[in-house]
Amino acid sequence: MKTHVTAEQIHSYREAGWLHCPGFLDADEVAELKGAVLDAVAQMGGSKLAGGKREMKEGGGYYDKVFTQRINLWRINDTVKSYMLNPDLGRMASELEGVDGFRVWHDQTLIKEPFGNQTSLHLDNPYWSFSSPHATSIWIALEDATLENGCLWFLPGSHRLGRFEAVGIGADMNGIFDVYPEMAEIDPVAAPMKAGDCSFHNGLLAHGAGANMTRKRRIAMTCGYMPDGSTFNGQTNILPPDYLETLTEGDVLDDEHQNPLVYRRVAEVTT
């Protein structure tokens, strides 16, 4: 896992709101993580959320035909956990965002099935139970992601325009512009990736993906990270009912079982 980032990459990420990192995983790591992801997906059957007390089942609507989505694989597969909760990955994300540390919000595999629907433009953080301008996600290609099979597209710089208003992933690619009309002035950029490449994107960056116009799956593994110290904003998202009952808006989300710490920068001690 190549987790070193340069000053130029950090600058590019903060300006554009996203960063492509070629060769993040080598071929053996891709095979190991892909195998673990597919094992976990098979174990979950039709359930979307692993290891929690909240039921999320696969349905038959438009969204369920965008991708096969399975969340929190780290809870049921130690190999996935070793990648998604890797402290060096946490440090890498912290350097990109300029924060002291990150906790896992949730991981998810997003498998765009053959002829799967487009993923319309959206922002990530407005769905989540915390609000931060420094949330980030990693997106790892476990097979080549191409223009034909539904690679990611980003609206560079849109994280500076994003607010904490959610836009659903529906049939209209341009539905986001009803909420964020100013983003319609930004030219989208495609991000094809080879297997083993990854990208990071800020939680307020507009992004989407095209339809899979091939007869093969497009397999990706992703994880959203929450800055350490983030607080509950009142939204349920994937939080289990028994944990929700203990929370009041403004409470720090630092439960190690639900949102384990991935990385925290240790302050230098001077004498």
Image: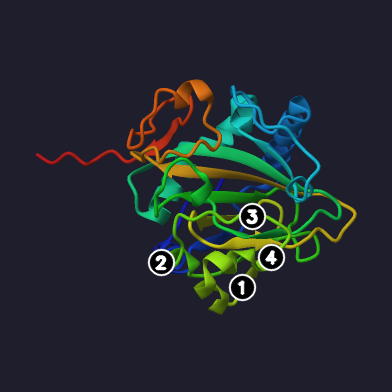
Badge nearest the viewer, 4 or 1: 4
- Per the image, the residue denoted by label 2 is 11
Tell me if I can see residue 191 in this picture: no
In terms of sequence position, does the residue under pointer 3 or pointer 2 come before the other? 2
Q: Amino acid at mark 1?
A: Pro
- Per the image, the residue denoted by label 3 is 197
Residue at image point 64% right, 32% down: 73
Q: Which secondary structure, mark 3?
A: loop
Q: Which secondary structure, mark 2?
A: helix
Q: Are marks 1 and 2 in contact (CB under 8 Å)?
A: no
Q: Is residue 211 left or right of residue 78?
A: right
Residue at image point 58% right, 69% down: 177
In terms of sequence position, does the residue under pointer 4 or pointer 2 come before the other? 2
Q: Are marks 4 and 1 in contact (CB under 8 Å)?
A: no
Q: Amino acid at mark 3?
A: Asp
Q: Position of residue 79 (x, y in %)?
A: 63, 30
- Per the image, the residue denoted by label 1 is 188
Tell me, for residue 173, which label it has, or none. 4
Question: Pointer 1: residues within 10 angstroms few (<14), some, or many (20+)?
Answer: some
In terms of sequence position, does the residue under pointer 1 or pointer 2 come before the other? 2
Task: Give the alpha-carbon distance from disc 3 to disc 1, as whole Å.
Answer: 20 Å
Q: Is residue 217 left or right of residue 9?
A: right
Q: Are marks 4 and 2 in contact (CB under 8 Å)?
A: no
Specify the quadrant that holds the N terminus: top right
Task: Give the alpha-carbon distance from disc 3 to disc 2, as whole Å.
Answer: 19 Å
